[in-house]
Amino acid sequence: MQAKKTVALLSVASIVLLAACGSDDTTSEPAGTAAGSETSDAAETTDAVVTTDGATAGVCPEKLVIQTDWFPELEHGGTYQLIGPDGTADKDTVSYSGPVQEQYAVGGLKEIEIKTVSFDKANSAILLDGEADMAYITMSDIIKDSAAVPMVAVAKTLDKDPQMVMWDPEQNDIQSPEDIATSGATVLHFPGTAYIDYMIGQGFMTEDQSNPSYDGSDAAWVAEGGNLVQQGFATNEVYKYENEIDWKDGAPAPVGFYTVEDLGFDNYPATIAMMQDKAAELSDCLTLLVPAMQQAWIDYLADPKPITDKMIEINTTYDGFWSLSEGLNAAGIELVESGGFAVNSPDGTYCSFDEEKVQNLYDILAPIYDEQGTEIATSIDGVFTNEYCADAPGR
């Protein structure tokens, strides 16, 4: 396997998650189980109203809160599409909210609030404490927390994970994953990241190399002149470090990188996850809502610029260290398409999870966490459901 080294990115014209183990004494039945298994009964919907056109209203809450795993970025576009470019960004709450666009307003849903990353609290804990109805959580981190926090993934966002590790190829000659370990370079990453556990377990890095103090900014990389290995997103940081961030001799410079899939870690990034009891409570709503949410993803991917342009504006309003640019967004979308990050599921929908893929991921993680003494669920039953994807569209 050869390391990826980008030397000249595509032109503008052509062109990250915290997870932590929590604890919970609550027990509940999952909203649904793995594909091919029996699913749970629908939640009670005695307040539902059937309109004259046959559409069911009142099964969904009027407002839905969705917790993302980072500041607005192109990997979140399908969720922001639900509101569209006419929502309101609030610097104080670091959130974007507004009426649901008419074509996605099903089951009585009227408003959505999209929250950005919380640096003080893992998304699993945010769900556990009822501070959001849904949250972006990778499938690997759902598995990692599966014994402690009863969550279920109800839909995918992307099919392939753009998370990566990157390095300066002039300072670290990395030609295979094993070379990361032999380089001895510090690996800067967020704490509690499942694919870092995997890299250690595979011998791609050592525990001594691990530095879980990454905050998502470029500060450490710039301060060290790029003499480290750092986590990021292939759809984002590669462009930034090669085109926008002056980190090497006062200028941007090429980086090498491996996506997690390149490392053998085939993961679903940023799934739409819920507490199992919450999903059961909103089961009738999810039957209508999940296909609408996935249609929003399809619509966004067909015409991303209105939303990616809005994300530039939203981040400017938030006035933090995170920013986007038209060039970055265009390059990232091009990579999403050319790299197959946003393809249909095997059943033809842009929604469902491949049971074999989830099982393979579980089989990778189970012995690692057994050795670490981290308890996880005894199987993949309940960590995801395709129940609500039955009527979802495909690209």
Image (tube, rainbow, N blue to C red):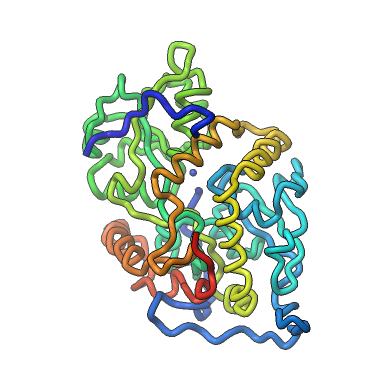
Q: Nearer the viewer, residue 309 or 135?
A: 309
Which residue is at a point 70% across and 74% down the rendered structure image? Answer: 107
Using residue 340 as the reference point, say whether residue 279 is left or right of it: right
Residue 130 vertical position relative to residue 197 in the rendered view, above or below: below
Which residue is at a point 68% across and 41% down the rendered structure image? Answer: 310
Instruction: Count up the numbered dots.
Output: 0
Using residue 55 as the reference point, say whether residue 325 is left or right of it: left
Q: Can you see residue 71?
A: no
Q: Can you see residue 328?
A: yes
Q: Nearer the viewer, residue 267 or 302?
A: 302
Using residue 321 as the reference point, say whether residue 29 is left or right of it: left
Which residue is at a point 40% across and 75% down the rendered structure image? Answer: 34
Which residue is at a point 72% across and 88% down the rendered structure image? Answer: 46
Whole-percent x and y of residue 200?
Answer: 28, 46
State the residue lying farthest toward the top.
249
Whole-percent x and y of residue 247?
Answer: 47, 19
Q: Nearer the viewer, residue 248 or 351?
A: 351
Q: Nearer the viewer, residue 333 or 73?
A: 333
Q: Quadrant of the N terminus?
A: top left
Q: Quadrant of residue 329?
A: top right
Q: Quadrant of residue 187?
A: top left
Whole-percent x and y of residue 173?
Answer: 25, 25
Using residue 133 as the reference point, say whether residue 102 is left or right of it: right
Whole-percent x and y of residue 189?
Answer: 43, 39
